[in-house]
Amino acid sequence: MQRNRLSLLHDLPCIACTLERCTQPLRTEAHHIVSQSYRKHSGGDAATIPLCSWHHRGELLYPLSSREMTELYGPSFARQKRAFIANYGTERELLALTNKQLERAA
C-alpha cells in the first residue's frame, strides 16, 4: 500500500497550489511529515502530502526571485514555514485533505 500511495500521490496536484488556486509551477513531490524532529515518528510514507518543488523545497523558476515566486504561488514550506502553515494549515491538516483526495481517487 505504501508504494501505491506514493504513486497515487505523484498524480495529485500540489495541495498548496490547489488551495492557492494557482497553476502548479513545478512537478509534484511527496513531502514526508516530520513529528518531534524525527521522520520515524511521523508515520513514514503513509504521512505524505503532494507539494510542487516550490512549495516543498523552495525551488525557483528562473528568472523569478523568491519574493516573486511567493507573490505568484504563495509561501514555500522550505523558505517560509510559518507563512506556509498560516496560509494552508498544518501538515496534519493537509494530510487529512490529501487522504480524502486519495479516497475519492480509489
Image (cartoon, rainbow, N blue to C red):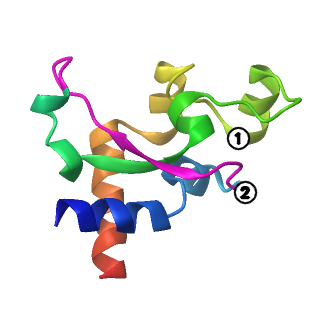
The residue indicated by pointer 2 is 23
The residue at 34%/79% (across/down) is 104
| First-in-chain label (1 vs 2) | 2
Q: For the residues labelled 1 and 2, say whether their Cβ atoms are less than 8 Å apart.
A: no
Element assignment for label 2: loop
Decide if residue 14 is on the left or right side of residue 105.
right
Q: Is residue 47 above or below residue 5?
A: above
Q: Quadrant of the N terminus?
A: bottom left
**Height in image: 62 above or below 50?**
above
Residue at image location 84% in from the left, 32% down from the top: 62
Q: Quadrant of residue 89?
A: top left
User: Is residue 32 located in the magenta-colored stretch of the structure?
Assistant: yes
Q: Is residue 79 left or right of residue 22?
A: left
Residue 36: within the magenta?
A: yes
Q: Quadrant of residue 33?
A: top left
For label 2, the crowd category at 10 Å Cα-Cα, with few meaning under 14, some 14 to 19 and many 20 or more, is: few
User: Residue 65 sits in which quadrant?
Assistant: top right
Q: Residue 46 placed where, x, y %?
A: 19, 52
Label annotation for residue 65: none
Give me the residue at 51% from left, 35% from top: 56
Residue depicted at 57% across the width and 57% down the height: 18
Q: Quadrant of the C terminus?
A: bottom left
> How many numbered discs, if any?
2
- In the picture of the structure, the residue carrying the numbered disc 1 is 73
Q: In the image, which residues are magenta?
A: 23-38
Tell me which amino acid carries mark 1.
Tyr
Left or right relative to 2: residue 11: right
Is most of the magenta stretch helix, strand or loop?
Answer: loop
Instruction: Indicate left or right for 58 with 101 as reference.
Output: right
Q: Of all residues shown, which one is farthest toward the left? A: 41
